[in-house]
Image: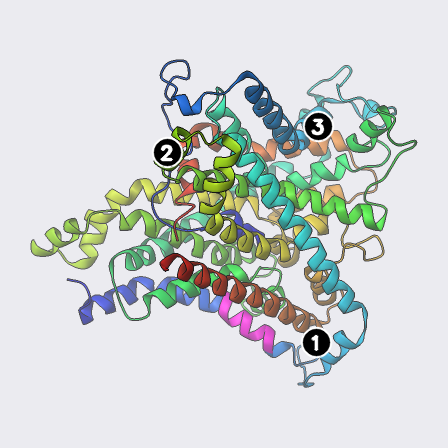
């Protein structure tokens, strides 16, 4: 019954609502972003095409390169921490010990609770005068006075990274755990019979078989982190003195904050180009990996 | 948007049940390979304690804060345990946080409408992907997933203009319409996997008996795929509930339509933040998700892990 012409038409009819919706709400805006990036659109309804002027402006201003570098450092710091902590968590949750189920459930809250609410809680923990982190560090005598984490550039930068890691870790952990459990048990049992220890089995069996899962997770995490908005906006709004302004925050400030739609769109296009590059690199790597397996 | 990655679609196929409803007893019949020496056990529990401390610290601290009176909150030195702790903030917040009940209702309402719309759009689409091999189906699926590459923040400017020209700004629709779009791809992916597991013979039997394609979908496939639809609905609801921020912040300025995160954000931005009440309000906002975790935990885990591995 499949692969006849009427079947194809039926499939297309089933898909039509989804396709039309995505075309209207994602594809058209994407196209519009590219068009707008070549105009001087602002609050007023009329605008003119200005060629590459927006791109020349943003790359000529100097601080855009700084924003790009900051975004990359922020993203890579956050993604690598998520991968390391996620793997650590997955290994622990994979151990068959009493309480396992409970521990697995307790891992999930940061993932499924409204993001903004988790961030409010971190906002209070970072408070200098009365917050938990500053307070505990003082109680233990590690710092002399109150330390407002969000008031200084570099501490605010790392504070936002930590919050982003916190939100991302549960998903990474659960996926790594699922991937770990799909590894055939016989492999471990065979190695175990031959006297291989836990660490050795992890290094030689678990880790190599998890490479595809790690790569997939890294890409998804990379895209999500690169586009991360809520955390920085709620905690610092890109401050202090732009030290936590990533490309997304920068785009938002330009477009929504100061109504320079054209220039904001140009900044958004640069983000899209970077994300596309990540994806291309990822698919190349996947292809290479699967070719390697064939040999 | 990061939301999308949350509800993600890492990859398809058989989901290893991460939390099995009935676990084998730990005392009897633990395989030799799973036996741990006492120092390994100590290490595992210590590691788990450290890991869960990181994951849960903000919630624990937030809960403690919600119990503390303001005078203790704004005093030094810091103490973790509330003195004279009470649930007072949980009742005073309703008057202090203007419109709190409304915010919570808005959040639930927006998520419910988004979920309903996503299910209506996604069920036929997932069926099409699961059953029909038409020209370009792989490419089309890839294009759906590519939606996740572009966050709402990147598309904000044209979306704003689109919403304005449709006259949807400052209404529930301003948050619902874009919210749906970014939840469609991962839901299609998830549901497609479920539907692909339903034996093809059932379709064929219905076909032989003269059932139309639409009838087959409605009367044969849909009832069988119901557990999958429920999982996708839960995932969509959680996704929609968790991510109400950027669209609501940008496309709506009317207080009566604000969802909880944005409503609390406005409260959060004030000069003197009543932290105990903010935290209490946050916990009430988390409650719906917590209820879902407790009661639907089994479905939830199936949804979260739907085949994390194979590609």
Which subunit holds the residue at mark 2? A
Quadrant of the rendering where the N terminus of chain B is positioned: bottom right
In the image as oriented, which residue stretches furthest toward the right?
A144
Earlier sequence position, callout 1 versus callout 2: 1
Foreground disc of the pair 3, 2: 2
How packed mark 1 is, by other alpha carbons closer than 10 Å (few <14, some 14-19, many 20 or more), is few
Q: Which residue is mark 2?
A: A190
* Picture residue at 57% right of the left edge, 59% below the top: B151
How packed mark 2 is, by other alpha carbons closer than 10 Å (few <14, some 14-19, many 20 or more), is few
Q: Relative to residue B96, is residue B309 drawn left or right? A: left
Q: Main secondary structure of the magenta part?
A: helix
Q: Which mark is residue B61?
A: 3
Residue situated in front as seen by the camera: B164 or B309 = B309
Q: Quadrant of residue B158?
A: bottom right
Label 3 and label 1 in one chain = no
Q: CA distance from mark 3 to mark 2?
A: 46 Å
Queried whether the magenta region covers residue A118, the answer comes back as: no
Residue numbers of the magenta segment: A26-34
Residue situated in front as seen by the camera: B280 or A9 = A9
In this view, A152 is above or below A294: above
């Amino acid at each position: 019954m499949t692969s006849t012409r009427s079947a194809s038409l039926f499939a297309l009819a089933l898909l039509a609502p989804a396709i039309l919706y995505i075309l209207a709400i994602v594809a058209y805006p994407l196209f519009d972003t590219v068009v707008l990036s070549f105009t001087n659109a602002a609050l007023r309804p009329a605008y003119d095409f200005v060629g590459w002027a927006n791109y020349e402006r943003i790359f000529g201003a100097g601080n855009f390169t700084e924003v790009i570098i900051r975004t990359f450092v922020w993203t890579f710091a956050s993604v690598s921490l998520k991968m390391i902590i996620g793997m650590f968590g997955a290994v622990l949750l994979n151990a068959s010990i009493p309480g396992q189920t409970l521990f697995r459930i307790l891992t999930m809250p940061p993932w499924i609770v409204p993001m903004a609410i988790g961030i409010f809680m971190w906002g209070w923990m970072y408070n200098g005068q009365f917050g938990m982190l500053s307070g505990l560090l003082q109680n233990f005598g590690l710092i002399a006075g109150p330390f407002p984490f969000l008031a200084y550039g570099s501490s605010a930068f790392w504070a936002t990274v930590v919050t982003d890691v916190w939100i991302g870790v549960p998903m990474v952990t659960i996926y790594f755990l699922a991937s770990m459990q799909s590894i055939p048990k016989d492999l471990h049992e065979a190695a175990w019979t031959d006297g291989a220890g836990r660490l050795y089995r992890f290094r030689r069996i678990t880790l190599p078989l998890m490479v595809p899962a790690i790569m997939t997770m890294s890409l998804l995490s990379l895209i999500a982190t690169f586009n991360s908005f809520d955390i920085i906006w709620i905690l610092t709004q890109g401050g202090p003195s732009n030290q936590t302004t990533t490309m997304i925050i920068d785009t938002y400030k330009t477009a929504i904050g100061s109504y320079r739609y054209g220039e904001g769109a140009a900044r958004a296009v640069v983000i899209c180009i970077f994300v596309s590059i990540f994806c291309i690199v990822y698919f190349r790597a996947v292809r290479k990996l699967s070719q390697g397996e064939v040999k | 948007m990061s939301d999308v990655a949350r509800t993600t679609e890492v990859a398809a196929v058989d989901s290893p049940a991460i939390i099995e409803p009935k676990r084998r007893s730990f005392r009897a019949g633990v395989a030799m390979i799973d036996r741990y020496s006492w120092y390994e056990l100590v290490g595992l529990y210590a590691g788990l304690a450290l890991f869960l401390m990181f994951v849960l610290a903000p919630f624990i601290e937030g809960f403690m804060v919600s119990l503390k009176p303001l005078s203790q909150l704004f005093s030094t030195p810091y103490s973790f345990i509330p003195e004279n702790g009470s649930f007072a903030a949980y009742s005073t917040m309703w008057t202090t946080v203007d419109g709190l009940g409304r915010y919570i209702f808005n959040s639930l309402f927006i998520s419910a409408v988004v979920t309903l719309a996503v299910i209506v759009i996604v069920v036929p689409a997932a069926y099409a992907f699961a059953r029909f091999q038409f020209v370009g189906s792989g490419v089309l699926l890839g294009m759906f997933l590519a939606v996740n590459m572009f966050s709402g923040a990147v598309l904000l400017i044209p979306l704003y203009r689109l919403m304005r020209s449709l006259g949807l700004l400052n209404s529930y629709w301003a948050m619902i319409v874009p919210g749906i779009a970014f939840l469609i791809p991962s839901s299609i992916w998830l549901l497609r996997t479920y539907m692909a597991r339903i034996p093809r013979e059932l379709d064929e039997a219905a076909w032989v008996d003269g059932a139309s394609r639409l009838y087959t979908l409605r009367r044969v496939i849909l009832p069988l795929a119901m557990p999958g639809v429920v999982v996708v609905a839960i995932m969509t609801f959680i996704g929609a509930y968790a991510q109400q921020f950027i669209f609501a912040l940008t496309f709506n300025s009317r207080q009566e339509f604000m969802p909880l995160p944005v409503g609390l954000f406005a409260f959060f931005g004030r000069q003197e933040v009543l932290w105990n009440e903010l935290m209490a309000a946050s916990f009430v906002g988390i409650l719906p998700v917590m209820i879902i975790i407790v009661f639907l935990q089994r479905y939830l885990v199936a949804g979260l892990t739907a085949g994390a591995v194979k590609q």
